[in-house]
Image (cartoon, grey):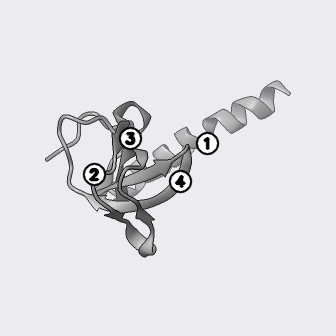
Amino acid sequence: MKNNKSNNKTTFKVLGYYEEYFVDNKFVGTKPSEFDGERTLGWFGRKTSFATEDIILERGKKIKTGVKYFTYLQQLCGKFEGSQEDKINAIQQSQAWKLRAKSTS
């Protein structure tokens, strides 16, 4: 399923999705996730919950039962899709702000 709520303006192959978990505004860990078509990626798709059972994250991290946490849904991108010319144009556009900043100083 294609994600129309992505902030990603270029074309990258989407390898999957994951959730970032935070407790007391501190990053705790990540966990692979399925794409939820109703949820927006990043900050605007943030969900706050209380753990009803222990949540086991990657690298052995754990959120204990009863702890308030929030998550962001993120996408994991891989290879840029497009021709070599498209890649060069995308890189030039992403760096254009640096050139404008140097020309004004």
Of discs 3 and 2, which sits in the foreground? Answer: 2
Mark before the other along the chain sequence, 3 or 2: 3
Q: Mark 2 points at which residue?
A: 52
Q: Which of 59 and 100 is in front in this view?
A: 59
Total number of numbered discs in the rendering: 4
Q: Are marks 2 and 4 in contact (CB under 8 Å)?
A: no
**Rendered-image quadrant of the C terminus:** top right
Mark before the other along the chain sequence, 1 or 2: 2
Of discs 1 and 3, which sits in the foreground? Answer: 3
Q: Mark 4 points at which residue?
A: 27
Q: Disc 1 residue type?
A: Gln
Element assignment for label 3: loop
For the residues labelled 2 and 4, the Cα–Cα distance comes to 19 Å
For the residues labelled 1 and 3, the Cα–Cα distance comes to 16 Å
Query: Is residue 59 in view?
Result: yes
Mark before the other along the chain sequence, 4 or 3: 3
Outermost residue toward the top in this view: 104
Mark before the other along the chain sequence, 1 or 3: 3
Q: Name the residue under label 1.
A: 95
Q: Disc 3 residue type?
A: Asn
Outermost residue toward the front in this view: 66
Q: Are marks 1 and 3 in contact (CB under 8 Å)?
A: no
Q: Where is residue 55 in the image (x, y as percent from the top left)?
A: 33, 61
For the residues labelled 4 and 3, the Cα–Cα distance comes to 22 Å
Q: Mark 3 points at which residue?
A: 8
Element assignment for label 1: helix
Q: Position of residue 56 (x, y in %)?
A: 35, 67
Q: Do the residues labelled 1 and 4 touch (CB within 8 Å)?
A: no
Mark before the other along the chain sequence, 1 or 4: 4
Q: Disc 2 residue type?
A: Thr
Task: Kindly indicate the quadrant of the structure image that contains residue 7.
Answer: top left
